[in-house]
């Protein structure tokens, strides 16, 4: 494929990957998961999961993508293991599934950006959220969000995704830093930091069967693993790049932004005296406006900045989820990019209709994605890279790496084969128990 696209620069690839990783997962999902799973204890398990499972797994996806130089499903053929195509297909399906409800939440965010300007949610945030989050209005907003996503993906890797995320990621960091500084001035900040940052290990131990899979799922989701995004993105990079350094940079930046989002959200949640446990998917949408209501004009500006950042983060992730499927059809079947993006956007929109109609469906779609499709897909991929690709995987990780790092490649392989694989298998088992409601 002589004229296949590539990233213009290494930084472009890193920013696009960070743009994929940083999204609703960090700012919308992470706070309410933390709140329902024991606060700082959840954060701790999450951080361990990022290092022990997330980083080795992101490298596994990079290795597959760069070696094959083709998007997810075709990659397994090209590496000489056509029997494993199903793993790529599962990933592509998972991405599709996830985007369907992700876009519904994205639609809420679009609405909240508008409402921050007009003051729409100021009177009664809970009622406002109830009115726009499900039903006809949510469907229209879901369509708007999907349309913007399609628009960016239609312009391709360099012209669309790379250009967009180059601007998006730095803006996210700058605005979140400003908001965190504001959060620090609130009287509730001390209590909030304590809740978010000083773990009570008893909580993890007592609730291990639910806290651990939730934290691992969150770590994988946040790093955009499992759904072939990182395979696809890595298929556009050159052999001179060190995958290890890039992977660590991406994981660290994503985690930093997640924790930063917590430092923004928790002081706001605590500021209104509501305990964070009480809030589910509506957490940031209800709590942030409520907390800002007393702050007058300043509150309006801060609310706007907050929801703009969430929107940018959501878009840069949504484009990655759509890109996976688009690039598969473009690469493997020679479809034309623009038309494919529009068509697939329509399919994803349709799949998202139940989630837009009723938030209970949204919760169900989310739990199937994060507790089932995601860990299963990562488990199969880790097995594939560890035990099937094996030596080839080590060679690929070494390519472009400095000597000192290159020596670590076999260690990584053995970690994948043992610790990482066992940890993911354990997560899948616990998730299945949780999902089927069987007693553990
Ligand atoms: N990581 C993104 C977030 O945190 C969501 C996302 C984008 C994703 N692409 C993905 C999750 C691929 C899993 C797989 O919001």
Image: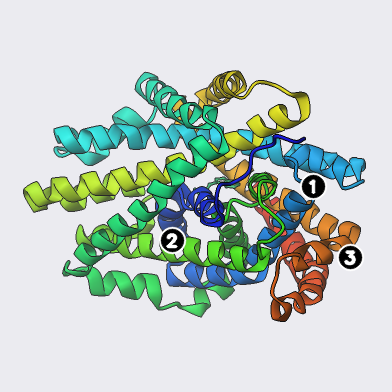
Disc 1 and disc 2: Cα gap in Å? 31 Å
Q: Is residue 293 above or below residue 359?
A: below
Mark carried by residue 68: 1
Residue 434 rendering spot, x and y as whole percentages: 65, 53
SS under mark 3: helix
**Which of 11/410 is in front?**
11
What is the quadrant of the N terminus in the image?
top right
Mark carried by residue 114: none
Residue 365 rendering spot, x and y as whole percentages: 57, 37
Q: Which of marks 3 and 1 is nearer the N terminus?
A: 1
What is the quadrant of the C terminus in the image?
bottom right
**Which of 117/6 is in front?**
6
Whether ligand 1 has any atom under 8 Å from the Cβ at mark 2 is answered as: no
Q: Disc 2 marks which residue?
A: 258
Residue 391 rendering spot, x and y as whole percentages: 89, 65
Q: Earlier in the sequence, mark 2 or mark 3?
A: 2
Q: Disc 3 marks which residue?
A: 391
Query: Is 61 situated left or right of 160 in this image?
Result: right
Q: Residues within 10 Å of mark 1 (few under 14, many from 20)?
A: many
Q: Which residue appears at 78% of the width and 77% of the height? A: 411
SS under mark 2: helix
Whether ligand 1 has any atom under 8 Å from the Cβ at mark 1 is answered as: no
SS under mark 1: helix
């Amino acid at each position: 494929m002589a004229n296949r696209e590539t990233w213009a620069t290494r930084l472009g690839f890193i920013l696009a990957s960070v743009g994929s990783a940083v999204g609703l997962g960090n700012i919308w999902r992470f706070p309410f998961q933390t709140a329902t799973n024991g606060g700082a204890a959840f954060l701790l398990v999450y951080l361990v999961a990022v290092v022990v499972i997330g980083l080795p797994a992101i490298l596994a996806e990079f290795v597959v993508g760069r070696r094959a130089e083709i998007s997810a499903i075709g990659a397994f053929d090209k590496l000489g293991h056509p029997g494993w195509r199903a793993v790529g297909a599962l990933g592509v399906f998972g991405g599709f599934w996830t985007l369907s409800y992700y876009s519904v939440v994205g639609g809420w965010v679009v609405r909240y950006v508008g409402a921050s300007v007009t003051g729409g949610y100021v009177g009664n945030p809970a009622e406002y959220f109830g009115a726009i989050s499900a039903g006809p209005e949510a469907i229209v907003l879901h369509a708007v969000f999907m349309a913007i996503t399609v628009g960016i993906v239609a312009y391709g890797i360099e012209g669309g995704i790379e250009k967009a995320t180059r601007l998006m990621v730095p803006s996210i960091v700058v605005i979140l830093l400003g908001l965190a500084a504001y959060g620090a001035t609130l009287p509730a900040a001390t209590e909030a930091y304590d809740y978010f940052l000083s773990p009570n290990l008893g909580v993890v131990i007592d609730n291990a069967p639910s806290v651990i899979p939730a934290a691992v799922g969150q770590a994988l989701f946040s790093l955009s693993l499992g759904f072939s995004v990182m395979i696809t993105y890595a298929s556009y990079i050159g052999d001179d790049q060190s995958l290890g350094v890039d992977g660590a940079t991406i994981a660290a930046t994503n985690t930093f932004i997640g924790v930063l989002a917590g430092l923004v959200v928790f002081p706001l949640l605590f500021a209104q005296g509501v305990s964070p446990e009480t809030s589910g998917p509506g957490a940031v949408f209800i709590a942030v406006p409520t907390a800002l209501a007393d702050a007058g004009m300043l509150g309006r500006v801060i609310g706007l900045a907050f929801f703009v950042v969430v929107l940018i983060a959501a878009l840069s992730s949504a484009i990655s989820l759509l890109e996976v499927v688009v690039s598969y059809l473009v690469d493997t079947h020679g479809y034309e990019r623009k038309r494919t993006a529009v068509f697939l956007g329509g399919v994803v929109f349709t799949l998202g209709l139940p989630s837009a109609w009723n938030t209970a469906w949204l919760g169900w779609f989310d739990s199937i994605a994060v507790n089932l499709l995601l860990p299963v897909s990562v488990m199969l991929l880790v097995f594939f890279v560890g035990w099937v690709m094996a030596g080839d995987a080590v060679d690929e990780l070494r390519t472009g790496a400095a000597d000192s790092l290159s020596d670590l490649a076999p260690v990584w392989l053995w970690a994948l084969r043992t610790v990482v694989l066992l940890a993911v298998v354990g997560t899948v088992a616990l998730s299945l128990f949780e999902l089927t409601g069987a007693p553990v």
